[in-house]
């Protein structure tokens, strides 16, 4: 099963209402609990092994100014994945997560303008945004027996941005620089 629902909107710390926080929590974390729990109950009752894949975001592993509620929910998915993996391992159920960064989607096009999209090559070490099929292929891997000894992990499918830790290519020289 793949938990791939979610949403994002700007949520600066000083401006986010309780309703806004709750909406982002429900869209990005609550459904992970509910879907995982329902799927796991059926698998355990049937005595079947399984694989659950949670989609999170790189924002769950780094600061996201202006998106505090979203980042908190995605961090929750990462932590929940680890805990669920440990609780479900005795039943042969694996739980892992995928944390993409910049991926070409309709949502990204709405958030970023053309000028921002042009500069992505400087931010992503591999020099381009990810594609949806690249994220999907990792989900297929995690759901398959090829990953039968993998549980509780978050795979960063991000072109290297998590590894870069704030380093990026300078637009003039192409050399790595911090900031």
Image: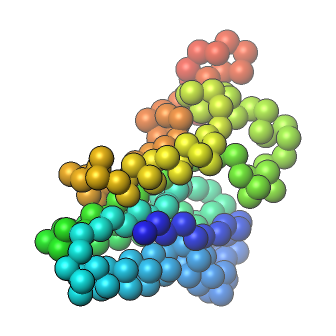
**Residue at the (28%, 72%) spot, across then down:** 84
Q: Quadrant of residue 86?
A: bottom left
Using the image as rendered, state which of residue 149 and residue 123 is in the foreground. Answer: 149
Using the image as rendered, state which of residue 113 and residue 179 is in the foreground. Answer: 113
Q: Is residue 138 above or below residue 173?
A: below
Using the image as rendered, state which of residue 1 and residue 99 is in the foreground. Answer: 1
**Residue at the (61%, 40%) spot, across then down:** 130
Image quadrant holding the C terminus, namely: top right
Residue at the left extreme? 90
Q: Is residue 52 above or below residue 136?
A: below
Image quadrant holding the N terminus, namely: bottom left
Asked whether residue 10 appears in the rendered view, the answer is yes
Q: Quadrant of residue 118?
A: top right
Residue at the top extreme? 173
Question: x%, y% of residue 32?
Answer: 45, 75
Using the image as rendered, state which of residue 150 and residue 17 is in the foreground. Answer: 150
Asked whether residue 168 appears in the rendered view, the answer is no
**Which scheme is used to colour this image of the protein?**
rainbow
**Residue at the (56%, 82%) spot, across then down:** 26
Question: x%, y% of residue 72?
Answer: 50, 68
Q: Quadrant of residue 171?
A: top right
Q: Is residue 13 left or right of residue 29?
A: right
């Amino acid at each position: 099963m793949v938990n791939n629902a979610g949403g994002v909107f700007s949520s600066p710390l000083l401006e986010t209402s309780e309703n806004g926080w709750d909406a982002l929590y429900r869209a990005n974390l609550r459904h992970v609990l509910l879907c995982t729990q329902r799927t796991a109950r059926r698998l355990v009752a049937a005595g079947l092994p399984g694989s659950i894949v949670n989609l999170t975001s790189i924002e769950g592993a780094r600061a996201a100014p202006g998106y505090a509620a979203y980042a908190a929910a995605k961090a929750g998915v990462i932590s929940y994945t680890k805990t669920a993996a440990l609780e479900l391992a005795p039943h042969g159920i694996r739980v892992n997560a995928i944390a993409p960064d910049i991926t070409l989607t309709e949502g990204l096009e709405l958030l970023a303008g053309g000028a921002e999209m042009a500069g992505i090559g400087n931010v992503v070490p591999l020099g381009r945004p990810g594609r949806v099929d690249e994220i999907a292929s990792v989900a297929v891997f995690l759901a398959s027996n090829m990953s039968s000894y993998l549980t509780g992990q978050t795979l960063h499918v991000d072109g290297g941005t998590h590894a870069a830790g704030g380093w990026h290519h300078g637009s003039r020289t192409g050399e790595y620089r911090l900031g």
